[in-house]
Image (cartoon, rainbow, N blue to C red):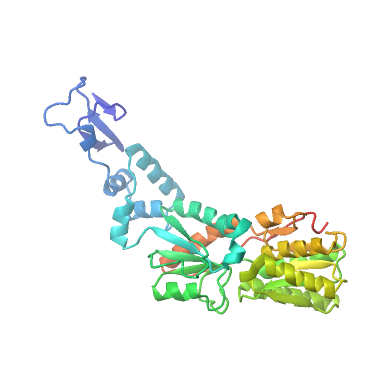
């Protein structure tokens, strides 16, 4: 009698009619010379390819996602693999390809900005989504956290790296290029159009926030911009200067060292508000700057939003936990992270490209109503 391998009484397994079948002698004892259950050979990629009627290469691409496979064919291959008990061997694939099966996510974002509530914010929101996207492609993702000494990336090898908002002449770019590691970025790398990137639409984000402040009645807006040469800060500054020129007010722009984060933003906002009491709106391009501005307004007993409105770029924990909560922007980071993973896989395979994030969405809160 032939049976599908569902019981523990197994003798010899073979592939027959796209299934594993076995001979069952009707007893609990294995016949002489038969292999035990633990020694039954596992199905190979060649077995699966024969069962599916496709090439070994097609099976490999169906699991890795690194080459296009007809969706119906890929689904049939995965269904057969499940029936047969086949699982791709990550070790064998690494040996054949010379790859590690690991990609990394890294940022040179200053430690002061990444610390505190933001540790569970911008970078981690990207990391969680990128890890899920990588896992569906049989890859692991390693998060390289911002390091106060700037040397936290060490000498570990990766198949490729996603850099989050790299700065101009970012040392991480130089490090991984020297090692020959493929790079893509979330946020374009200033001066490096050759690095594939997901454009975060930073100028559009800044324009949305500035137009919102104006629509709410703010006519004298100050800007707190990061001094580091990252595209998000460069484009935010350009958008602010254009807004001030268009609205006819002299710009009040302060470039802040991101390494000093919230504390520096508080001190500088205190100075700004004391010297320019007519300020009725603050655009903070970094969420740590926004919470510092809120602290300054509280110290000066400037009501938010009654006397001054505050908005920021990223809708993270700092924005949500602020008192009052901050109007911010949904940057659609999960979708952006997924696009970055695909860009990196294309880059690893020698294909260059770019992608654009979804249009940002305004998240209106009490700080600017």
* x and y, in percent, of residue 202 in the image: 66, 68
Task: State the image coordinates of residue 57 (x, y, percent, origin top left).
Answer: 33, 56
Measuring 27% from the left and 27% from the top, which residue is drawn there?
8
Q: Is residue 226 visible?
A: yes
104 lies above or below 87: below
Compared across the picture, whether 203 is left or right of 340 comes to: right
In the picture, which quadrant includes the C terminus?
bottom right
For residue 189, which quarter of the picture?
bottom right
Picture quadrant where residue 211 is located: bottom right
Q: Position of residue 333 (x, y in %)?
A: 60, 58
Q: Residue at x 75, y 74 (%)?
A: 240
Q: Which of 214 and 86 is in front in this view?
A: 214
> Is 136 displayed left or right of 57 in the figure?
right
Q: Residue at x 27, y 43 (%)?
A: 43
Q: In which quadrant of the rendered view does residue 306 lie?
A: bottom right
| Depicted 13 relative to depicted 300: above or below | above
- Is residue 356 visible to us here? no
Q: How many labels does the image show?
A: 0
Name the one closer to the observer, 211 or 326: 326
Q: In this view, does 223 lie to the left or right of 216?
A: left
Q: In the visual, does 121 lie left or right of 31?
A: right
């Amino acid at each position: 009698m032939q049976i599908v391998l569902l019981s523990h009484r197994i003798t010899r397994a073979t592939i027959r009619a796209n299934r594993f079948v076995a001979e069952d002698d009707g007893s609990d004892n294995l016949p002489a010379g038969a292999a035990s259950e633990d020694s039954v050979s596992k199905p190979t990629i060649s077995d699966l390819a024969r069962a599916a009627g496709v090439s070994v290469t097609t099976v490999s691409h169906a699991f890795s996602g690194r080459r296009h496979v007809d969706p119906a064919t890929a689904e049939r291959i995965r269904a057969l693999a499940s029936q047969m008990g086949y699982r791709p061997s990550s070790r064998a694939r690494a040996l054949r390809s010379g790859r590690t099966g690991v990609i990394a996510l890294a940022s040179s974002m200053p430690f002061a900005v990444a610390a505190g509530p933001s540790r569970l914010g911008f970078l981690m929101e990207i990391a969680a989504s990128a890890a899920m996207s990588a896992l569906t492609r049989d890859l692991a993702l390693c998060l390289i956290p911002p390091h106060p000494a700037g040397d936290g990336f060490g000498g570990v090898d990766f198949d490729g790296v996603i850099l989050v908002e790299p700065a101009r002449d970012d040392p991480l770019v130089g490090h991984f290029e020297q090692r020959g590691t493929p790079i893509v970025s979330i946020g374009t790398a200033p001066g490096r159009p050759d690095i594939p990137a997901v454009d975060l639409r930073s100028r559009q984000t800044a324009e949305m926030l500035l137009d919102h402040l104006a629509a709410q009645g703010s006519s004298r807006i100050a800007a707190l911009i990061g001094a580091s040469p990252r595209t998000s800060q460069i484009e935010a500054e350009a958008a602010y200067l254009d807004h001030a020129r268009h609205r006819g007010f002299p710009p009040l722009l302060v470039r802040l060292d991101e390494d000093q984060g919230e504390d520096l933003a508080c001190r500088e906002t205190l100075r700004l508000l004391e010297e320019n009491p007519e300020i009725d709106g603050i655009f903070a391009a970094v969420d740590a700057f926004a919470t510092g501005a809120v602290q300054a307004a509280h110290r000066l007993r400037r009501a938010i939003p009654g006397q001054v409105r505050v908005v920021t770029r990223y809708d993270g924990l700092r924005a949500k936990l602020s008192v009052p909560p901050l109007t911010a922007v949904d940057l659609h980071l999960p979708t952006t992270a997924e696009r970055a993973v695909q860009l990196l896989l294309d880059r690893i395979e020698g294909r260059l490209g770019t992608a654009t994030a979804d249009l940002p969405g305004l998240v209106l809160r009490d700080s600017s109503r």
